[in-house]
Amino acid sequence: MGGTGSSSMMNSLLIYSWLCLMLSLVPFSIFFVALQSRPRIVEGTVFINGSSRIGRTDADFICATLDWWPPEKCDYGTCSWGTTSLLNLDLTNPLLLNAIKAFSPLKIRLGGTLQNKGCLALSRWDELNTFFREAGAEVIFGLNALNGRTIASDGSAKGAWNSSNAEALIRYTVNKNFTIFGWELGNELSGSGIGTSVAPDQYASDITNLHDIVRKTYASLGKRKKKPLVLAPGGFYDANWLTEFINKTPKNSLQVVTHHIYNLGPGDDTHLIDRILDPSYLDGGSSPFSGLQGILKSSGSSAVAWVGEAGGAYNSGHNLVTNAFVFSFWYLDQLGMASSYNTKTYCRQSLVGGNYGLLNPTTFVPNPDYYSALLWHRLMGTKVLSTSFSGTKKIRAYAHCSKKSVSEDPETKCSYWKIHECSKESQYF
């Protein structure tokens, strides 16, 4: 294929629409998510605009979470967490270690509802950091954002954040020479919150406090160690709340705005598979991505967007759905959609635990979505290209510049192999 970056790319394909395809093409990595259940041949066209990129992801875009839930956490009569909490996870299991190592690196976000009320022993913190260092993981740790506040009768949290405990942990972490990729303040306390909420102006003040702690604590290391990111709020998209929060947070205090996605509904919903395979329903998932990008752009903030937690179906997912092959149609579409809106990182709930883990919670054997995540990590580069598929709405296509560089186009910076000359108007695979 030719390598003129300003040209448009057309690719006529015959695709079995019941397949989920992921193809590594040069100069682009493309995947197709086919949503149709009955086997029939569909003729369609993939259009890739190679003249410019529409987004850029982090190289380590794929992320997974570890939660705090104990074995007693049960939903709809099913207890699916076992010993998968960051407090009791078996860190000696070689399957767990190798599953993380395969990404080299994998971002891992440690957090969840109980981070705002749980207790982590320093000895366990040592064990976790030793394990993650061996696994080559990049750790994001969620801090308790309710410390020092009082909860009003309406569920709102009043008062400033008491940062003394967090500061002590951060200082301990630095003194032990543990590497932390980011410190995130709070979990699902934005907007109306889950259980309780914090006002956006107060949250902005608290983030400034956290930023100052991180800056001062890591200053002694100079340039020997990269300063961790400051992330917040780790909640659901609420345009009004986020607008005020971002506008009132000093531009240099916040590096990442995180939001959570459970857009399929509760885990006991009997229509989960219908929603997963419904293109119009999936289209609705773009609203938080586009909305947050609009807020960031209009505010002039230098912060970027991450999906900090996404399990699709809340309350631990649904066995044989959110841990099965069918869920890859939702997951891969989310990765492609998030990337196209300039989302830098996407954290899947969970690495292990609940009914939506990438790994089986008992055996640590990979579930289907683990391989979807690994394929994305190995094939898809950071530069996102405008892509569409015409012929049926049941097939969704996304394209990035390839991760494997051979040569590079000077305009798009996409890598390519030049096989034959094509016209300036179009190029064909």
Image (tube, helix red, strand yellow):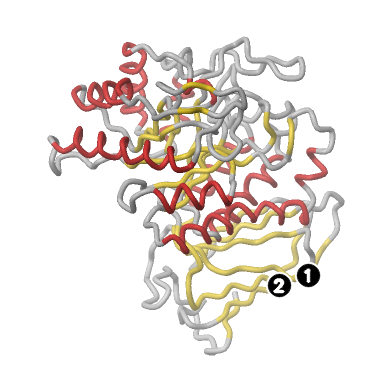
In-image side of 415 versus 371 (left or right): left
Sooner in the amino-acid sequence: mark 1 or mark 2: 2
- The reply to whether callout 1 and callout 2 are in contact (CB within 8 Å) is yes
Residue designated by label 1: 391
> Does residue 164 lie above or below 198 as drawn?
above
Label number found at residue 91: none
Query: Callout 2, which amino acid?
Result: Thr
Relative horizontal placement of residue 227, taking residue 42 as reference (left or right) = left
Tell me where residue 110 appears, x and y as whole percent: 45, 28
For marks 1 and 2, give the CA distance: 7 Å
In percent of width and height, residue 157 lies at 51, 28
Residue 61 is situated, as x and y percent measured from the top left of the image, at 46, 48
Is 34 situated above or below 258?
A: below
Q: Residues within 10 Å of mark 2 (few under 14, many from 20)?
A: some
Q: Quadrant of the C terminus?
A: bottom right
What secondary structure is found at the residue carrying circle 1?
loop
Kindly identify the residue that appears in the image at 26 percent across and 21 percent down. Answer: 168
**Element marked by disc 2:** strand
Relative depth, front residue between 352 and 429: 352
Question: What residue would you read off at disc 2?
Answer: 45
Quadrant position of residue 227: top left
